Amino acid sequence: MFLEYSPVLVFLVFALTLSSVIVGASYFLAIKRPDYEKVQQYECGFNPFSDSRQPFEVRFFLVGILFIIFDLEISFLFPWSVVLSNLHIFGYWTMIIFLTILTIGLLYEWLKGGLEWE
């Protein structure tokens, strides 16, 4: 039984060794010049060292919502594209209508200025 799983073990050892070498090389060979801007947190959308009761800007939430919407669109496109050759005409046109509605929503957001940060 060990002989059957030995290729998997060899692959795991090779993957761990290679990833350790790459991470170690990038740690030792990288040029390190940290400054104030590089060490700042950037996920939150505002200065993290100010008042904790500072309200978020609406643009931060709009960008997040738009990302979720179009991320879900892609998650529907992958299975549809895999079974596209086996679908009947109803399945094809259902997805075309779905994509049309999302495209109209994207155009609406674009024309209203929702995609511009400033």
Image (cartoon, grey):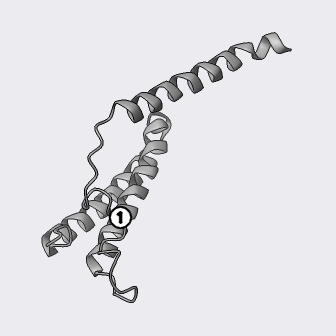
| Position in image of residue 65 (x %, y %) | 36, 69
Quadrant where the N terminus lies? top right
Q: Nearer the viewer, residue 23 or 12?
A: 23
Q: Residue at x 46, y 32 (%)?
A: 23
Whether residue 88 can be seen here: no
Amino acid type, mark 1: Gln
The residue singled out by tag 1 in the image is 41
Q: For mark 1, does the 10 Å Cα neighbourhood hold few (<14), some (14 to 19), or many (20 or more) residues?
A: few
Is 11 above or below relative to 68?
Answer: above
Quarter the C terminus occupies:
bottom left
Q: Quadrant of residue 53?
A: bottom left
The location of residue 56, given as percent across then percent down, is: 33, 82
Quick one: which residue is furthest to the right in this view?
1
Q: Residue at coordinates 32% horizontally, 63% vertically from top-left?
A: 40
Q: Residue at x 33, y 56 (%)?
A: 99
Report x, y in % for residue 12: 64, 23
Number of dots carrying numbers: 1
From this view, report whether residue 35 is shown above or below residue 59: above
Taking the image as shown, residue 10 lies to the left or right of residue 84, namely right
Compare residues 73 and 113 and report the one nearer the observer: 113
Query: Closest to the observer: 40 or 106?
Result: 40
Q: Tell me the element at label 1.
A: loop
Q: From this viewpoint, is residue 8 visible?
A: yes
Q: Nearer the viewer, residue 78 or 14?
A: 14
Using the rendered view, name the quadrant where residue 117 is placed. bottom left
Looking at the image, is 95 positioned above or below residue 13? Answer: below
